[in-house]
Amino acid sequence: MKRLGLVLVAALLAGAAGPSNPAAGSLSRDNLPWWHARHVAAVARARLGHVDLVFLGDSITQNWEERGPPDWRDFAPQWQRFYSDRNPLNLGFKGDTTASLIWRMEHGEVDGIQPKAAVVLIGANNNGRVHWSAEQTIGGIEAVIAEAHRKLPGTKILLLSVLPSERSAWVDETTIATNRGLAERYGHGQDPLVTYMDVTGLFMKDGHLDKAAFLDGYLTPPDPLLHPTAQTQTRLSEAMEPTLAKMMGDRVHR
């Protein structure tokens, strides 16, 4: 009976990551001129090699390239502080789901590189227009990790939880369920190359979402809270740093 239960769980996981799951598929956004241009530039950069650290994600990752003023949008000093000496490659693309990240990985963005570590932060946009379920998003993230293993064998992966946001009750519930599933899948050393880190607490205050932690509320007009401020993203880097330094085999950046 126990063996049958394990077989059923394995079958469910395989189904979540299979071709019937759009989050685990491969979806191009190449019809968008800015997206196409960024993809072409990313492929060209990968061909140059000499990448020790790669970031795989969406706009939250792309925001490392933002410069202020104002100070809540000035990410450049912290990128310089934590990552500039690690031969980094930023593969964050605004609006990307797991499926579009998979497409980019399949089409040259990580070809020819062998980084020591990869930071994966993806899934927030799965809760947006496409409205994919927690099970689908977990399968999509599993597919991202599988593609990373295929393209970047031996690279250690720091997988971050999907960040909390202020969009809807459904998004809140789906984010919690997704992170719970990721913890079950990756939080106990099942994959020796993957370390899962739930960073939800960095965005909470007194048991509630810390609205000051997000830059969207400072915009005119404000947007739904989704993207960390530069200061909050610094706290995220500080939380990641001991694990990342161990993966990189270098010093802890402070």
Image (tube, helix red, strand yellow):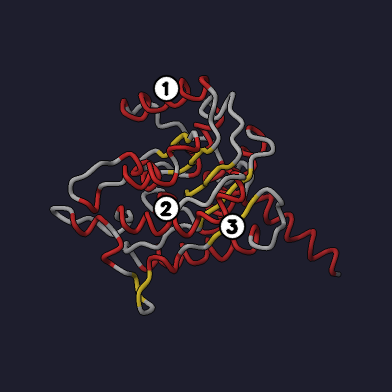
Q: Position of residue 241 (x, y in %)?
A: 50, 54
Judging by the rendered image, the residue that carries numbered circle 2 is 124
Is 110 on the left-hand or right-hand side of 212? right
Amino acid, disc 3: Tyr
CA distance for labels 1 and 3: 30 Å
Residue toward you, 223 or 240:
240
In-front residue for pair 103/149: 149
Q: CA distance from mark 3 to mark 2?
A: 16 Å
Judging from the image, what secondary structure is the residue with disc 2 in?
A: helix
* Local crowd size for mark 1, using a 10 Å CA cut-off: few (<14), some (14–19), many (≥20): some
Disc 2 residue type?
Answer: Ala
SS at badge 1: helix
* 70 lies left or right of 171: left
Q: Which mark is residue 209?
A: none
Q: Nearer the viewer, residue 190 or 17?
A: 190
Q: Residue at x 35, y 74 (%)?
A: 205
